[in-house]
Amino acid sequence: MGSPGLMEFRKSCLGAAGRLMMDIMQFDWEPLGHWELDQRLDQAVEEMIEADLMSGVQAQCSPVLMQVSPQEDFLPFTQEQTQTLTIQVSEEPLSTVFLEEQEEHISEIEGNPTVQYVTALLQSSNSSHSQSRLTGRARLSLSHTVFLSLTLLSKRLSYRTVSSTFRLEKGNIHRIFFSFCDRVNALQDQLIRWPTGEEAAEHLLPFSSWLGWDERLEERGLPQVLGMLGHTRIPIRLPISKQDGESAVPYAKRLKKEPHPDSWLNLELVCNSQGRFIYCRISRGSDRDRGSALSEKLQHNPELMPPGTCLLARVGYPLTRHILTPFSPGRSPQENLYNRSVEAHLGGFDQAVADLKERFQKLRYLDMGNFERAKAVVLTCCILHNVFLEMGHVTKGQVDREVREEEEGRKEEDGITLRDTVVNLLYSALEEGTD
């Protein structure tokens, strides 16, 4: 028998080898180039259809069961579309019955308002990738692609589970799903856009809810709020190269250790008063930057911020003439009053993030170690979040704020001056109201 240290080393090597094999298998399923993906997908679907028809001819009297579990549905779908569908063979040839039932199932999916809306959105896209996928030989229809992808995004399901439901191989589902994500990502500029002009004016909020709109205070320098800036973490599978290093750390120390930064993505967002995302930036967990890219963008494009407006963010973000942050901590009644007004707005950001994760439960944990793949899925969810808000689909998630200590971000002179102005205006308005 070997020493305990040698046994532990062998176990870690065996585990690393197993994870390597899984990554190699997954890599084989990764999306290919658009042309090669089309060709392989066409061939796979044609073989699947042919195999189904041949098996039907060979089993004239066998019932065909096709089930969509209610726990695997997408919330906007109707109950009739998520119930168990049993297709019983009659005395007619099975191939005819099978095709008729398949056509009925297809019409049910294509008739769903959610599928129709997203399908039409993808068809109307000017993306060459989107257009190329609408022509060619027999393939999984666009509406079925949408249905399958929304199912994967809305629930934490494995490819194995979905493969049995949609009668497709896991490898094909993997390729179809990421092809869908690529097509939705192409709509980012169209659906996650910064508001300007009248659109921006429609969603402005008063700085303080208890003051409401007060033109006199606004004339004296109290800004209106264009949006709320913040971030959240999206857990992902740690890449295999990082797992080896983690396994070498004793278990007791791993429990006390901060999770590896590559085990999550940073999702930075700006949402408006309706919870719609108007800005989205996805980075690796090791990226400690908070709002610098957005701050620089606003500095070089001041027309993006209407006069007399600002963004609100928590401690850790830069304090600038466009972004206001709280005091950490408030050291006077004036600063505490200001902090409460800021936090009231940031509660709206927390709710928008909770709604996103409730609607797309796949974001609770992405079982993929490839950064670009994980980033594509997260961006897809953010874009579709806006799409469903446009459709009037409201989902309320439970707010579970991620509490982490953050160091104060950089402070610009213009930001300090604006914050001091707001502090004084809020407190003077409070004093005037109590006289």
Image (spheres, rainbow, N blue to C red):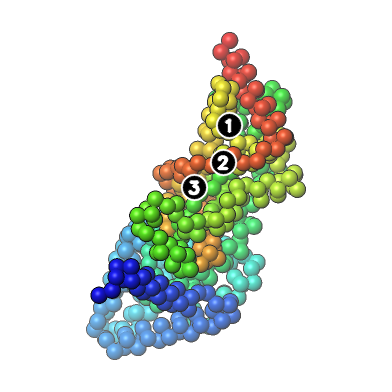
- Above or below, 77 against 210 in this view is below
Q: Which of the marked residues, 3 or 1, is nearer the chain's N terminus?
A: 1
Q: Residue at x 51, y 63 (%)?
A: 374
Residue 157 in the image: above or below residue 191 = below
The residue indicated by pointer 3 is: 353
Spatial CA distance of label 1 from label 2 is: 12 Å
**Nearest to N terminus: mark 1 or mark 2:** 1
Q: Answer with mark 3 or mark 2, whichever residue precedes in sequence.
A: 3
Answer yes or no: is residue 200 visible.
yes
Question: Percent position (x, y) of residue 50?
Answer: 40, 86
Q: Position of residue 431 (x, y in %)?
A: 59, 15
Q: CA distance from mark 3 to mark 1?
A: 23 Å
Q: Mark 1 or mark 2, which is nearer to you? A: 2
- Residue marked by disc 1: 327
Question: Are there few (<14), some (14-19), or many (20+) residues within 10 Å of tag 2?
Answer: few
Question: Height in image: 206 above or below 145?
Answer: above
Mark 3 falls on what kind of element? helix
Image quarter (top left, top right, bottom left or bottom right) of the N terminus: bottom left
| Most foreground residue, 137 or 275 | 275
Q: Is residue 219 left or right of residue 142?
A: right
> In terms of secondary structure, where does tag 2 sit?
loop
Q: Residue at x 70, y 49 (%)?
A: 297
Q: Amino acid at mark 3?
A: Val
Q: Residues within 10 Å of mark 1 (few under 14, many from 20)?
A: some
Q: Are marks 1 and 2 in contact (CB under 8 Å)?
A: no
Residue linked to disc 2:
407
Query: Picture coordinates of residue 348 (x, y %)?
Result: 51, 39
Mark 3: few, some, or many residues within 10 Å (few <14, many ≥20)?
many
Amino acid found under the numbered disc labelled 2:
Glu
Residue at image location 24% in from the left, 84% down from the top? 61
Q: CA distance from mark 3 to mark 2?
A: 22 Å
